């Protein structure tokens, strides 16, 4: 028996189908609401209760702390897969065979050269430019060097566009860092794995050999996997809604990068370190700041704790905490900022106020710690997030285009003036 939801407005009842989807979730289909009611709409600021699309990519249950990519648990993927395997899974729907993975990696490496004129664009940025602004601009500029639009009905053209951006994006991310650091732009080494090659492009100095630390590589690989997709968040929704106008992949990704930039989204791990630095400047008294966080009249916010979606522990944080501890031990980093972070973590996990409200450290807290330990500048944290989120954005854009979803066009609830006759300027 099909389920029905009934809405009553001014004594008149309207029925709408209730859809039961994967994982036993229910959704009320209100796409005919405005038409059948003669103009009634809904309002849901922040879209907390509104599904903008159907998607088969990521399942997230915030109450139970569950995150799955294409049905695979984030815990198992982080333990057993590498980033490129997860990227393939997200984009194409299944884990790759050995042959498919080798071809995927080989094709990506074949696209890892960026047109030399891109360097002229980078030269135009001041050294102080934020790397996210540089990365967004360079991603958008790729359209100029690849002007042919992708035929989304051609699997070959779609695949070529995907490996092209997966090959070039790590180069652009590393170059955004090296521009800021005053280092020559480097292409790395295609004999290395995807993550190792990216690290070499980032950190290799022209006068030294660069060797990847396996503990660091493993931690970064896990971070990229954990960030690879997260359902319909701000940046992913942006990629889908920009792409719904039939905008191309590179332009849609550039829009996603800009959306990710905000401190409430991808910039959260940067905000964590900035908060820790502020605490250090104030004598490093963590107990004082824990008290401020619990004081409702105090505007201070404890960054990196709790999550809008997860009402329990962030499952990604459980995984990356182990890597953060390993990295700190392996590198033997002595940093007062990281000591403050460990102090806050300990107090939050033991403080009744935080435990009762399930305000546990989230993935942004631990990713900020890892990036800091690796010597990555604070304003490069969000570009690192973007590198991880790239496969998810691609998968979401591809799904949206293949499903031929209509152009995104939210309604609004108008609260402005009613009709007013125009007055000539001398009569105002």
Image (tube, rainbow, N blue to C red):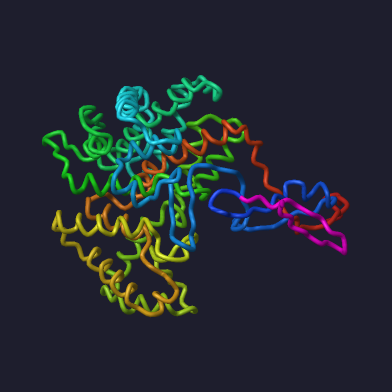
**Residue at coordinates 46% horizontally, 22% vertically from top-left?**
146
- Residue 131, placed above or below residue 24: above
**Residue at coordinates 48% horizontally, 31% vertically from top-left?**
250
**In the rendered view, does 408 fall on the left or right side of 11?**
left
Which quadrant does the C terminus fall into? Answer: bottom right
- Residue 200, placed above or below residue 261: above
The one of 371 and 306 positioned closer to us in this rendering: 306
Task: Classify residue 160 by image quadrant.
Answer: top left
Magenta segment, prevailing SS (helix, strand or loop): strand
**In the rendered view, does 154 fall on the left or right side of 81?**
right
Task: Classify residue 369 by image quadrant.
Answer: bottom left
**In the rendered view, does 380 fall on the left or right side of 298?**
left
Residue 378 on image: x %, y %: 31, 53
Residue 419 on image: x %, y %: 86, 54
**In the rendered view, does 428 fall on the left or right side of 166?**
right
Q: Can residue 424 be seen by looking at this rendering?
A: yes
Q: Is residue 3 magenta?
A: yes
The one of 394 and 142 positioned closer to us in this rendering: 394
User: What residue occupies the far left of the structure in this picture?
Assistant: 208
How many tags in the picture?
0
Q: Is residue 418 magenta?
A: no
> Which residues are the magenta region?
1-20
Residue 371 on image: x %, y %: 27, 52
The one of 65 and 34 positioned closer to us in this rendering: 65
Residue 372 on image: x %, y %: 26, 55
**Residue at coordinates 44% horizontally, 49% vertically from top-left?**
261
């Amino acid at each position: 028996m099909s389920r029905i939801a009934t809405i009553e407005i001014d004594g008149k009842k309207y029925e709408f189908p209730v859809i039961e989807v994967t994982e036993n979730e229910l959704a009320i289909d209100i796409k005919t609401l405005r038409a059948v009611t003669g103009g009634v709409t809904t309002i849901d600021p922040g879209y907390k209760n509104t599904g903008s699309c159907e998607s088969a990519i990521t399942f997230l249950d915030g109450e139970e702390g569950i995150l799955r990519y294409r049905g695979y648990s984030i815990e198992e993927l982080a333990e057993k897969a590498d980033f490129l395997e997860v990227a393939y899974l997200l984009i194409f729907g299944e884990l790759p065979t050995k042959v498919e993975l080798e071809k995927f990696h080989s094709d990506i490496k074949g696209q890892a050269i960026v047109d030399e004129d891109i360097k002229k664009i980078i030269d135009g940025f001041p050294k102080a430019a934020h790397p996210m602004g540089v990365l967004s601009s360079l991603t958008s500029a790729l359209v100029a060097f690849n002007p042919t639009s992708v035929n989304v009905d051609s699997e070959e053209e779609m695949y070529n566009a995907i490996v092209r951006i997966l090959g070039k994006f790590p180069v652009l991310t590393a170059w955004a860092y090296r521009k800021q650091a005053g280092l020559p732009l480097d292409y790395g080494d295609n004999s290395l794995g995807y993550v190792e090659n990216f690290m070499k492009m980032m950190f290799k100095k022209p006068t030294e050999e660069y060797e990847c630390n396996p503990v660091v590589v493993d931690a970064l690989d896990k971070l990229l996997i954990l960030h690879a997709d997260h359902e319909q968040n701000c940046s992913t929704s942006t990629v889908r809604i920009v792409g719904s106008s039939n905008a191309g992949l590179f332009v849609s990704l550039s829009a996603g990068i800009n959306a990710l930039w905000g401190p409430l989204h991808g910039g959260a791990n940067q905000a964590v370190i900035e908060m820790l630095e502020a605490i250090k400047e104030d004598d490093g008294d963590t107990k004082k700041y824990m008290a401020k966080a619990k004081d409702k009249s105090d505007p201070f916010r404890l960054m990196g704790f709790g999550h809008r979606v997860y009402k329990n522990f962030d499952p990604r944080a459980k995984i990356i905490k182990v890597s953060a501890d390993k990295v700190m031990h392996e590198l033997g980093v002595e940093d007062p900022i990281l000591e403050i972070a460990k102090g806050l973590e300990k107090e939050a996990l033991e403080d009744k106020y935080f435990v009762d409200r399930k305000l546990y450290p989230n993935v942004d807290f631990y990713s900020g710690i890892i990036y800091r330990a690796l010597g990555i500048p604070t304003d490069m944290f969000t570009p690192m997030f973007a590198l991880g989120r790239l496969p998810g954005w691609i998968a979401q854009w591809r799904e949206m285009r293949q499903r031929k979803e209509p152009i995104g066009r939210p309604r609004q609830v108008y609260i402005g003036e009613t009709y007013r006759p125009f007055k000539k300027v001398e009569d105002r």
